[in-house]
Amino acid sequence: MSITLFGTAGSTCTSLVLTTLFEKQVQDFVLKNVNLAKGEHKKPEYLKLQPFGVIPVLQDGDLTIFESRAIARYVSDKYEGQGTPLLGKTEKERALVNQWLEVESQNYYPVVSSIAYQLVFGPRRGLKPDEKVVEQQLEKFEKILDIYEEHLAKNEYLAGNFFSLADLSHIPYTYLLLHQAKKGEGITSRKHVKAWWDKISSRPSWKQLLDLRAQS
Amino acid sequence: MASLMVYGKAYSANVTRVLTTLAEKNVDDYQMVPIDLLTGANKTPEYLKLQPFGQIPAFQDGDFTLYESRAIARYISDKYEGQGTALFGKTVRDKALVNQWLEVESQNYNPCVWKIVFECVFSQMFEGRPTNEAVVKEQLEKLEKILDVYEAQLTHHKYLAGDLFSLADLAHIPVTNNLINVAKKGELFASRKHLNAWWDDISSRPSWQKVVQIMQAEQQEQK
């Protein structure tokens, strides 16, 4: 057993890595809980692994790697021969997976995480939501979702007719938006976005993640 | 007749990220199609067919269209794997570290630097308002902490992902050029010995020098 993942099942970024491990049928790893409430992620021992002081970080033997999207790529690469192929099979498929991974990273995530901060993470720390920011971000989100709707009307998944890491990378934050921030109308009101969301969020890998959260 | 097309303008760091990758892989045979944000050329129906988010760059290889500069850079590295500089290392482990620092650039460095550059240089041009100094101050504080991590990394490694130059270093060049040479925040680098040495090294690579010439030629054409 060579893999140790530092993080929490409740964290969106750790969840991306966990779901990728499950999708690749990797069960043989250890999840080491990082106590955020006690500031464990800011202590010297943790900062040696992840100098930016955030979760998750993965150790595989003497390789330490952080940034959830990079860890997910590593898991997809290392376990290429098993589980779901996540990065595309041809040069063009790989390019489209990368394109939509970047769309998530550069367009989707900044807007959704801003809403999540206002409505979920900030209030946990006693902060009051700024309704103006939420409104502005939701407006931006509507425009982004219009593009997704048009694209998913012609493609079953983001990179084409196959599920990939590009779809998977959207799951944790979209789940949080719907179930914790309660701002999912943009997703549920668009026929093809909703169908895509229903399909990807009912995958066994995500169900396994939710079970793990329930147990934690 | 080039089958590779890059849509955009060289004043954009996202566009020059792609141009630098092409140069690093010794790919000369491409055409630039000007799409100027200032004229709204990125919002025409024809352009939105290529890049539905209305951003630059977009890229075509024959009839294959791609967007997002970091994805385009990956595609070029893939397609031209056999020539130019190896941009992802040699092993799965090397590649993991390149991907890690690509994400650090994407998630930490770029958003922070872009906010500073936008406020200091582009707020008037694009939003008709002066610099918001409070935003600059907040982002500079964040950036100082980020650069401390970079300094520590580069104290022990010549490049971000290890001993060899990679796409992770390249991805930083255009925005860092904006930060230092356009927004005039060079002191952030000058005060960090190894970070500064890294910047001198990567910004003097022939690939970036070539792109600087493209940027200057474009500026000349505008006059």
Image (cartoon, coloured by chain):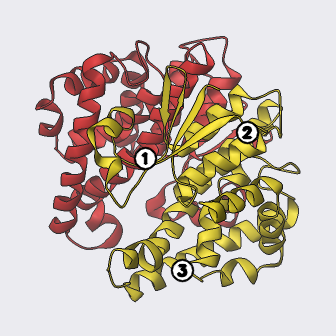
Chain colours: A yellow, B red
Q: Amino acid type of disc 1?
A: Ser
Q: Secondary structure at mark 1?
A: loop
Q: Is residue B97 left or right of residue B184?
A: right
- Disc 2 to disc 3: CB gap under 8 Å: no
Q: Position of residue B133 (x, y in %)?
A: 15, 66
On whether disc 3 and disc 1 are found on a single subunit, the reply is no
Letter of the chain that mark 1 sits on in the rendering = B
- Disc 2 to disc 1: CB gap under 8 Å: no
Alpha carbon separation for disc pair 2 and 1: 44 Å
Residue indicated by mark 3: A138
On whether disc 2 and disc 1 are found on a single subunit, the reply is no
Q: Residue at x 32, y 80 (%)?
A: A127
Q: Residue at x 74, y 58 (%)?
A: A206
Q: Is residue B67 visible?
A: no
The number of callouts visible is 3
Residue indicated by mark 1: B12
Q: Position of residue B57 (x, y in %)?
A: 56, 47
Q: Amino acid type of disc 3?
A: Leu
Which tag is nearer the camera, tag 2 or tag 3? 2
Letter of the chain that mark 2 sits on in the rendering = A
Q: Residues within 10 Å of mark 1 (few under 14, many from 20)?
A: some
Q: Is residue B80 visible?
A: yes
Quarter of image, res A189? bottom right
Residue indicated by mark 2: A27
Q: Secondary structure at mark 3?
A: helix
Q: Position of residue B127 (x, y in %)?
A: 33, 71
Which tag is nearer the camera, tag 3 or tag 1? 3
- Name the outermost residue toward the front: A215
Q: Residues within 10 Å of mark 3 (few under 14, many from 20)?
A: some
Quadrant containing the N terminus of chain A is top right
Q: Is residue B126 left or right of residue B41?
A: left
